[in-house]
Structure formats: structure tokens, C-alpha cells
Image (cartoon, helix red, strand yellow):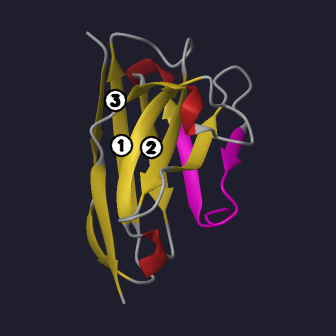
Amino acid sequence: EVQLVESGGGLVQAGGSLRLSCTASGFTFDDYAPGWFRQAPGKERDGVSSISVSDSTAYYAHSVKGRFTMSIDNAKNTVYLQMNNLTPEDTAVYYCAGGNIATIAIAPERVNFWGQGTQVIVSS
């Protein structure tokens, strides 16, 4: 059974930090590149970050570049999203994903597997 289990969301004040984790089972990130997406209320689900396991290239949405860092622990089949200097505009449900998404586009339509999502709320 394929599963992606996220953790680490919560409530934080603007300027604060959170670290999201996502562990995959039933497949490996070698076969399906990992990524993070987010969806704010009333908005579409957008790509935040993805990473190429083959060459460790990370891709970021313009809105998070310089503040968010994605990393991977291949031995644990786990990825992380370190989010710093958070703003209220970062408030969303964050989803871990696996698919053909290790590109600059970080396209949700190329996702094969989705996690259940974890809520991030940034207060002003």
C-alpha cells in the first residue's frame, strides 16, 4: 500500500519557523520524485518545492525561494521542508507528493501519490 504521511504543521507567528516531515511507504523517492504542494482556502493547489533524487537539485516556487529548504533522507525515505520567516500568506494545507515533479514547474498534474496534508497557520 502506498502511503505518504506528513507531520509538523501547526500554528506559528509571522517570522517564525516550522519543519514539515513526510515519510513514504510502498514506493521509494528514487522512483517517484518527492515534492511539497500547498493549497490555501479558495485557491488552487500550487507547487512549493521538489527535489531530484538523482542529482539532489531542488526546485522552489518563487514565493518561497530563500525562505524554504527541502531536503531528503534517502535511508528513511523521508523528506523535509524547513520553512523560515513565515508570513500569513504561507497559511495553507501542505501536501507531500511523489511523482514526475522534479522540474522547475513542480506541476500538480504530474503527481502520482499524495499525502493527506498538514495544516500550517501563520498569524500576523
Residue 124, placed above or below residue 27:
below
Q: Amino acid at mark 2?
A: Tyr
Q: Which residue is mark 3?
A: 23
N-terminal-most mark, 2 or 3 = 3
Q: What's drawn in magenta, residue-wise?
A: 58-71
Q: Amino acid at mark 1?
A: Ser
Q: Is residue 78 left or right of residue 84?
A: left
Helix, strand or loop at label 2? It is strand
Q: Which residue ends up furthest to the bottom in the rendered image?
A: 124
Location of residue 122 in the rendering, given as x and y in whole percent from the top left corner: 35, 76
Query: Between 52 and 99, which is closer to the camera in this rendering?
Result: 99
Helix, strand or loop at label 3? It is strand
**Mark 2 and mark 1 residues within 8 Å of each other at the beta carbon:** yes
Query: Between 28 and 107, which is closer to the camera in this rendering?
Result: 107
Q: Which residue is mark 1?
A: 21
Asked if one can make out residue 8 in the rendered structure from this viewpoint, the answer is no
Helix, strand or loop at label 1? It is strand
Location of residue 50 in the rendering, given as x and y in whole percent from the top left corner: 60, 39
Distance between mark 2 and mark 3 Cα atoms: 9 Å
Place residue 10 in its image quadrant.
bottom left
Residue 123, placed above or below residue 40:
below
Distance between mark 2 and mark 1 Cα atoms: 5 Å
Q: Which residue is mark 2?
A: 80
Q: Is residue 111 left or right of residue 88?
A: right
